[in-house]
Amino acid sequence: MRSSDRAGGAPSVWSIMRPVQGQIRFAMVLAGLAAASSLGALCALAWAVHALLAAPGQWPWPPLLLAAALTVLAYVLRLTGFNQSHYAAFRLETRLRTDLAGHLARLPLGYVQQTGSGALTKVMMDDVKALHVFVADSTPLYARAYVSPVLTFVLLWLLDWRLALAATAVLAVGMAVVSLAMRGGGEMMQRYHAAGENVSKAVVEYVQAMPVVRTFDTGTSTFQRYQRALNEFVAVVLLWYRMAGFSSRMSVAILNPLPTLAALVWLGGWLISRDALAASTWLAVLLVGTGMAESLLPLMSLRHLVAKTQMSIHRIHEVMAEPVLPVPDAAQAREPRDASVCFEHVDFRYTADGPLVLRDVSFEARPGSVTALVGPSGAGKTTVARLIPRFWDVSAGCIRVGGVDVREMLPETLMRQVAFVFQDTFLFADTIAGNIHLGRPEATMEAVIAAARAAQAHDFIMALPQGYDTPAGERGVFLSGGQRQRITIARAILQNRPILVLDEATAFADPENEVALVAALSNLMRGKTVLMVAHRLSTIRDADQILVFDQGRLAERGRHDALVAQGGVYARLWRNFEQAQNWALAGEHA
Ligand SMILES: Nc1ncnc2c1ncn2[C@@H]1O[C@H](COP(=O)(O)OP(=O)(O)OP(=O)(O)O)[C@@H](O)[C@H]1O
């Protein structure tokens, strides 16, 4: 994904949770209360010990029952806290996915196409999931990691300030070692996550590109890229382990209960030997204080989780910060008056600092006429076609549909006017009929079949196992490129919009498919204003106007015969095309 400056100020983990803030706070309060109850249960046990020492023959029922009740309460509170944080996580997940989906629907199509469905799916699925995990599992842990040591310290202080200081000293040493372990950790963590991301990218490339690479180099080069990413990842992990290994092992050693216990036993024993401490207080301190340092341990793993979640938030923010396509107010929006398309002095660049891809392009396609866009590769034909449905907005000048600037129309108005048949056809995970229905859900089945017939698709659809009810899409029935295109042509015929933009619609068709495609297209084009990007010059000899692009400029325009006679760019393209045709024929006869 393009890293954008706009995404520079990504929100923090805590501020992205704002929509469910109340519930998370509640979950954290419950987790804090659970920690307090656990400590309360330990205090009650200490009270029981005290009572037993005072009257050895009697069972101290009240403190024992209190300890049991507090233990149950702690359990219930912790469970309720986790329930709340999980609810909050689900709510946040739904909210973020809805916001992201709503935002994506308002972004320029060009951004969506350029970023790629893979990267956007990853944000909507994986990154939102990462946030869910953080909210659900980590927020209660945070509350516990802060509440437990503070409350323990207060209790210890009330019992005996000297032992309280001893336990705190162990904790302070542990904290110092932890911060030593985490020194430079931020940078290492970034390197670790970046290396991890490289591995996943290499895996995706290796798997996705397998059909292509295996036919060219048996997959060795992409496998090597994957191997290299993996080696770099291992190197980063080892380095980090070496750098932080000793001090992080030390911090685990110090923060486990044993060192605190040793300090309290030793100091308590010494104080008792000098009659400066009551045995029951000593026992109470041992019960309550031993776990004080240990309760800090989750903070170490939480730090990693926060850093990982922050990266996901950054990517979510990057998408959300992308500016939406400006749309006019419904009250000010205008309706087109006919089916004309007009470019007025259009300049276009893909990025603010990129080169001009179109320069001062002006032309008009009259209602019901056929306009062909031709020119050498990279001349800007596809860009012209994609500017009409506002994949992007022009950098200067304007595009009018039916006399109205496309930016002054509601997107749905524009969509009602213009149908597109692009090279990269996409079928949804729906039936064939459902795919043709798209955009006209109210159409009858008879209308769907009539459209499929006109698109030369009816016969092959009927030959499929379940006819029109056969599932299509990624996991659906296998269809050839030409068949998929004819289904999208059927869709466009059913939509019956007055303006039609075709992009390379017949480029990869085999001869048999091409005959069907040309027939389908001529049915589709009847009576429409057509703008077609064409490589096969044979298909455009009869066009009402041919626009010849060269390096982003409109170099020539006119009808076929006049342009050939003119002896310019078109004449050259035509000569090359005829030569290629002759070579192909010569090859067939050889
Ligand atoms: N998404 C994009 N981002 C940046 N530059 C782009 C993008 N798409 C196309 N370009 C550039 O814009 C110029 C025009 O490209 P365009 O695809 O419109 O040409 P074309 O005439 O349709 O070419 P072809 O016949 O090879 O498809 C090219 O220089 C291309 O590199």
Image (cartoon, rainbow, N blue to C red):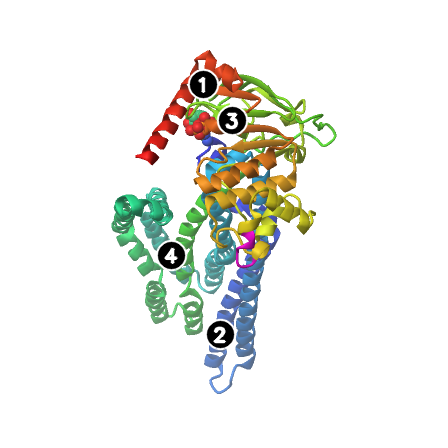
Q: Earlier in the sequence, mark 4 or mark 2?
A: 2
Q: Earlier in the sequence, mark 3 or mark 1?
A: 3
Q: Earlier in the sequence, mark 1 or mark 2?
A: 2
Q: Main secondary structure of the magenta part?
A: loop
Q: Earlier in the sequence, mark 4 or mark 1?
A: 4
Q: Residues within 10 Å of mark 4 (few under 14, many from 20)?
A: many
Name the residue carrying label 1: 570
Q: Residues within 10 Å of mark 2 (few under 14, many from 20)?
A: many
Cα–Cα gap, marks 4 and 2: 24 Å
Q: Amino acid at mark 1?
A: Tyr
Name the residue carrying label 2: 45
Name the residue carrying label 4: 171
Residue 43 spot, x, y in % from top left: 50, 70
Q: Quadrant of ligand 1?
A: top left
Q: Residues within 10 Å of mark 3 (few under 14, many from 20)?
A: many
Residues in magenta, as a range: 461-466
The answer to whether 560 appears left or right of 252 in the picture is right
Q: Residues within 10 Å of mark 1 (few under 14, many from 20)?
A: many
Tell which tag, 4 or 1, sits nearer the viewer: 1
Q: Is residue 546 visible?
A: yes
